[in-house]
Image (cartoon, rainbow, N blue to C red):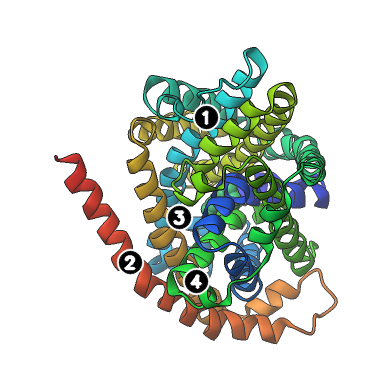
Amino acid sequence: MATAAREHWSSRTGFVLAAVGSAVGLGNMWRFSYLAAENGGAAFVVFYLLVTLCVGIPVLLAELVVGRGSQQSPIRALAHYGGPAWKPLGFAFVAAGFLILSYYGVIAGWTLRYAFEAVVGGFPADVANRFGEVATGWDAFGYHVLFMGITIGIVAGGVKGGIERTSLVMMPALFVIVVGLAIWAATLPGARPGYTYYLSTDFSKLFHWSVIKDAAGQAFFSLSLGMGAMLTFASYLSRDEHLPASTLVIAGADAAVAFVAGLVVFPLIFALGLQDRVSASTVGALFITLPQAFAEMGGVGRIVGLLFFVTLAVGALTSAISLLEVVVASAMDGLGWSRHRAAWLAGAAITLLGAPSAWNTEVLGVIDQVANNLFLLGGGLALSIFVGWVMHDPVAEAADGTEGIQWFPVWQWLLRVVVPIFLVLVLWFAIPETWTAVKGLFSQLSR
Ligand code: TRP
């Protein structure tokens, strides 16, 4: 049996930091701030927190339960509890891993590039206009390859020796730097309107379906849910782990980093009077506006900018690891490949799959939409039904390692009723929108 030789985390902290590492990534800084900017600041933040609480946390616990209980990679884990009919869902998880990592690596490559430039020459004054150059073509692809190479190397190193070790070092460093940057941003003259924009709620926007949909997609993306990443990490846990406690720590840390990242980004942008550029928001907003801010600040900007982009790259790396691990664990369990072989072959395939995103940011944006709106939300829906209705006695499995928790019935009720209804509603709107985006892209490409 594959389970006999299965690797395990060496400590609870190791697992939690790896899971937090998966959750905290480009989503918390790049995606969160551009979506917040696009959706009226605090209205978005409020809804995002609500969705995290009522939908994200229940689904996260569900993934951990299936992973730890089965001690297997996603495809087998689902078959373990639900029979072979559930295998296709596992394949969809693996496909989502491929898809997301392919463009995630490209964006991570931009962060490496900016960090590198901050060291060698500083941020050039015309950095905003140069984004097109940085973001696409051989340059972008080259940095993507570099980033993927590092990711593959870590995953090939194994659960303990690669993933856990990296997270133990990098995550605490990331927390310290993000908090430090937020404190620094508070000292900037003219930062106040940034806070106002970020933290005052425009309730008229709150019940706009597109805000709700973006907040739901973001909550899933940010917590790495809906494609078996957390499930896979939990499959390396031993039975005495307190899953509900881990769930709360992971979700809390993830939301906290997103929130604090907003306390860096918004004051900084407003202090330099660059807010108009962000409202014309695209995937590139953060990568256009912030380097410009750093360029205008001269020497200080160079140091702060370096810290900022290194932090982004670190967050991206620990997230990319978890995306690749889903594919690698599945190939190891399903095809009997060695970890090395799985990491390098799958990693190379994903790197190549990133080429279209590296050459065209529109393609990147549409793949991001497809991955989030269809794969993650759809995967979350299927998973909540699976654990809520199909799996035998998930509460007993979740309770293992705890002393009986009062709110397990609430969890089950959320998973059975609230989460599926909410996700069906969101998908109802998200599917046609995604379809339109895909069609738009194709007609644009064929022109
Ligand atoms: N959560 C990460 C972020 O916020 C991205 C990520 C890592 C992810 N693994 C995932 C998203 C699995 C969805 C599914 O950047």
Label 4, residues with CA under 10 Å away: few <14, some 14-19, many ≥20: many
Instruction: Determine which of the numbered discs, if any, sits on residue 93 in the image.
Output: 3
Question: For the residue with label 2, is its CB less than 8 Å from the closest atom of ligand 1?
Answer: no
The residue tagged with tag 2: helix, strand or loop? helix
Name which residue type carries label 2.
Ile
* Residue mark closest to the camera, 4 vs 1: 4
Q: Earlier in the sequence, mark 2 or mark 4?
A: 4
- Choose top left, top right, bottom left or bottom right for residue 51: bottom right
Where residue 383 appears, as percent x and y from the top left, is 50, 69
Name which residue type carries label 4.
Ile
What residue is shown with label 4? 212
Where residue 72 appears, as percent x and y from the top left, is 58, 55
Nearer-the-camera pick, 379 or 194: 194
What residue is shown with label 1? 109
Q: Residue at x 14, y 39 (%)?
A: 447
What residue is shown with label 2? 431
Instruction: Determine which of the numbered discs, if any, sits on residue 379 in the image.
Output: none
**Cα–Cα gap, marks 3 and 1:** 24 Å
Q: Earlier in the sequence, mark 3 or mark 1?
A: 3
Q: With respect to residue 330, does 290 lie above or below?
A: above
